[in-house]
Amino acid sequence: MCGVCGELRLDGSPAEVGAIGRMLGRLVPRGPDNEGRYSDGPVALGHRRLSIIDLSERANQPMVDDELGLVLVFNGTIYNYRELRDELSQQGYHFFSDGDSEVILKAYHAWGEQCVERLHGMFAFAIWDASHEQLFMARDRLGIKPLYYSLTAGKLRFASNTQALLAAGDVDTSIDPVGLHHQLTLHAVIPAPHTILNGIKKMIPGTSLTAQANGEIKEQSYWQLNATRPETPMSETEWVDTIHEALRKSVKRRLEIADVPVGVLLSGGLDSSLLVALLAEQGVKDIRTFSVGFEDVPEERGSEFEYSDLVVEHYKTQHHKYTIPNEQVLKRLPEAIGHMAEPMVAQDAVAFYLLSEQVSQEVKVVQSGQGADEVFGGYFWYPLMDAETGSDLERFSKHYFDRSHEEFLETVTPAYRGEDHTSLRVEQMLAEPGTDSFIDSVLRMDTTTLIVDDPVKRVDNMTMAWGLEARVPFLDHELVELAMKMPPELKLRSGGKHVLKTIARELLPAEVIDRPKGYFPMPALKYVRGDFLSFMKDILDSRACKERGLFNRDYVNKLLAEPEKYYTKLQGSKLWHLTLLELWLQLNVDNV
């Protein structure tokens, strides 16, 4: 896991080396172990390393292969790099390091743009091909690793987060109206290539981009996900056995491909508990687990330790349990937001941030349960959508959109009012071919788009803020491809995630499996009152917010007058959504 950045001039000028230095300064948390730079004429590359595989200096980056005339900067992990290395060695390639980075270089030389189709893992990388004066960039199939870029008439810059691009300078920081509409209506998910800023884009998952120094740019998709039934029908028992084996393989891959210890973020929910069980099932001893909780309040408990403790006791893990005082939550919240590559409204972001701070002192790599709900149908709104009538868009939007288009128009000032971008985009995604039912379309869209810019991005940003690599076994692309073939009714049974619950029956205490679905309890941020309300009021009434002129003041005042009245369909505070966006802009854009 690392931070990458670079610049390719498209106007014949030499790359600006100083910009690389400024970007690297904002990537230090992602790669605390080493810094490297490379420049040659129109290109300059930078890398901050978190040493996970091949801890020697030979694996430092930018990785230069003089024999092949290639230079690489890479963020991520390739789980099948050993198999690829063997195949490439048989073709006559010689290796000077022992990690996965060099395998990407050789794979690109051997197979060109199609190399990404052979990579199994999470990745965002760029390769400079000196002989052809071209830059090749790619992002993994499910967008686990981020890759942002800015493109002007004279140059292409890229980085692992927006903060680095902003630090480099020359970025149009005006608000993207499409991104704004998604931000406020689609649970703060802005599908690629848009972001909240006009001057910054992000690569679409499962795509690559080739940029020539002469200014020619070509983008291509290398992976599509279908959700159709297999040619030979499978029984429920066959599905359970097949998914179980695929999960074992996924968890094992993410354990073995590391030269450092690997832990598990254990929330006490089914997904993370199942990861512990699968590791134990394969004979792993001394599993390291980590849980976080907060102080109770009269209305709600502040932790789910009662469930994680059951798993710890059952498998005798090496457990680390952290309790964060509620007074620390608001105090540390701006730090967490300052590390968000894009504004994310989920209140558990600060929980992941504070947990990662502690975990990073013990291990460099953890497995985490993101993706299970989307891939295996675990959220409460899926059955509600399935039971609805009307168009696919109507069935989905009724249970997911944070605001209708009409309320969006009421939320923002006239300068930002325009088309219903979210409805247009969602309708398009739901209508794409390659699914057998409405729920198939929803789960595919959730897995390939919505999850990318909500829980997956959140975990990447909050863990990498402390140099901690998070691996997500439920988003192994082979497992996802398999699960998408499963009949959706099999997923939605038992209140969702039926197959995972069936697998877990032989591995986990029943209390963990049958508990109500929970989320990180965050009492200090859940109840829109007291210090939390004062915090939001100060931001929305600030001079910066008023001068920005983004929000309609009448709408803001309506929310402030009755702060606990206005919630989204997913039970998010509409007041918090505005506050988060404004504070993110103040911390990450205004201070550049």
Image (cartoon, rainbow, N blue to C red):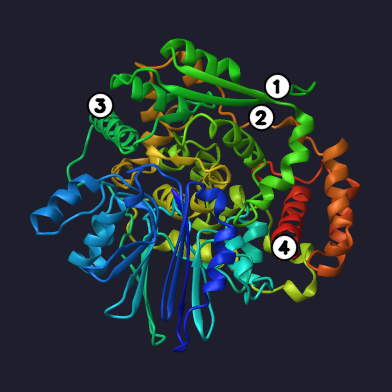
Q: Which residue is mark 3?
A: 237
Q: Which residue is mark 1?
A: 301
Whether residue 393 sits left or right of residue 204 in the image: it is: right
CA neighbours of label 3 inside 10 A, class few (<14), some (14 to 19), many (20+): few
Amino acid type at image mark 2 = Pro
Look at 46% across and 40% down and name the residue there. 470
At mark 1, the secondary structure is loop
Please state which of the two labelled residues, at mark 3 or mark 1, is closer to the viewer.
1
CA neighbours of label 2 inside 10 A, class few (<14), some (14 to 19), many (20+): many
Along the polypeptide, which appears first: circle 1 or circle 2?
Answer: 1
Amino acid type at image mark 1 = Arg
Amino acid type at image mark 4 = Phe
CA neighbours of label 1 inside 10 A, class few (<14), some (14 to 19), many (20+): some
User: Do tag 1 and tag 4 residues touch (Cβ < 8 Å)?
Assistant: no
Kindly report the distance in space between the C-alpha atoms of the residues bearing marks 3 and 1: 38 Å
Look at 45% across and 53% down and name the residue there. 145
User: Do tag 3 and tag 2 residues touch (Cβ < 8 Å)?
Assistant: no
Residue 43, compared with residue 527, is above or below; it is below
Quarter holding residue 143: bottom left
Kindly report the distance in space between the C-alpha atoms of the residues bearing marks 3 and 2: 35 Å
Please state which of the two labelled residues, at mark 3 or mark 2, is closer to the viewer.
2
CA neighbours of label 4 inside 10 A, class few (<14), some (14 to 19), many (20+): many
Kindly report the distance in space between the C-alpha atoms of the residues bearing marks 4 and 2: 29 Å
Whether residue 309 sits left or right of residue 145 in the image: it is: right
